[in-house]
């Protein structure tokens, strides 16, 4: 049985595309340095995640506070900054990874408690009442004092 050259050529062309190593890539957003301190009634908050929610289709930026309440925001990668502009802010507590509880906690009463309880309104950018302006030049002096 003879295979027509045109069919052989078409099959070859189609198979050439099948072996490609295509990996979809996420859009990389232009960021500026952004870091600061989170406090509650003047006391530093440790282990809390600060998230900035920009307007439009831009990606959020977030960072976790250290023992002094300091955080560095990341958008495309940890610590790479935030998109310049106006952002709504949310703050939630992140239990430590090494909490000894395993991967599933069936009883919410057994969840580790945050070092300081903050009002639930801060968990949502729509109810927190906090906005931050990230300047085009970036900032290492962002201050968030919850009360």
Image (spheres, rainbow, N blue to C red):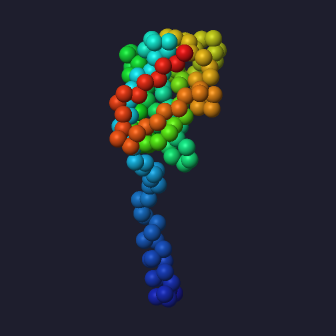
Answer above or below: position of 28 versus 53. Answer: below
Q: Position of residue 116 (x, y in %)?
A: 52, 11
The percent coordinates of residue 92 (x first, y second) are: 54, 23
In screen coordinates, is 131 left or right of 33? right
| Placement of the C terminus among the 4 image quadrants | top right
Q: Is residue 94 above or below residue 54?
A: above
Which residue does the image show at 50% across and 15% down from the upper left?
40
Q: Residue at x 64, y 15 (%)?
A: 108
Q: Is residue 99 in view from this perspective?
A: no
Q: Is residue 65 above or below residue 22?
A: above
Residue 143: quarter of image:
top left
Residue at 50 percent of width and 39 percent of height: 86
Along the line of sight, which residue is nearer the eye, 114 or 137? 137
Give x and y (percent) for residue 63: 43, 29
Q: Nearer the viewer, residue 144 or 104?
A: 144
Q: Is residue 36 left or right of residue 111?
A: left
Across and down, in percent, residue 125 comes to 59, 31
- Return the residue nearer the eye: 2 or 38: 38
Residue 48 visible in the current orientation? yes
Q: Number of callouts in the render?
A: 0
Residue at left offset 59%, top offset 11%: 110
């Amino acid at each position: 049985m003879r295979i027509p050259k045109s069919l052989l050529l078409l099959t070859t062309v189609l198979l050439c595309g099948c072996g490609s190593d295509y990996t979809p890539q996420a859009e990389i957003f232009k960021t500026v340095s952004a870091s600061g301190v989170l406090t509650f009634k003047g006391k530093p908050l440790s282990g809390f995640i600060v998230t900035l929610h920009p307007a439009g289709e831009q990606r959020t930026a977030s960072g976790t506070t250290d023992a002094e309440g300091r955080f560095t925001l990341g958008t495309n990668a940890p610590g790479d900054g935030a998109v310049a502009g106006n952002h709504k802010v949310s703050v939630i507590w992140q239990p430590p990874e090494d909490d000894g509880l395993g991967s599933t906690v069936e009883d919410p009463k057994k969840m580790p408690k945050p070092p300081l309880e903050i009002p639930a309104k801060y968990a949502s950018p729509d109810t927190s009442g906090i906005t931050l302006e990230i300047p085009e030049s970036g900032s290492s002096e962002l201050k968030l004092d919850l009360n």
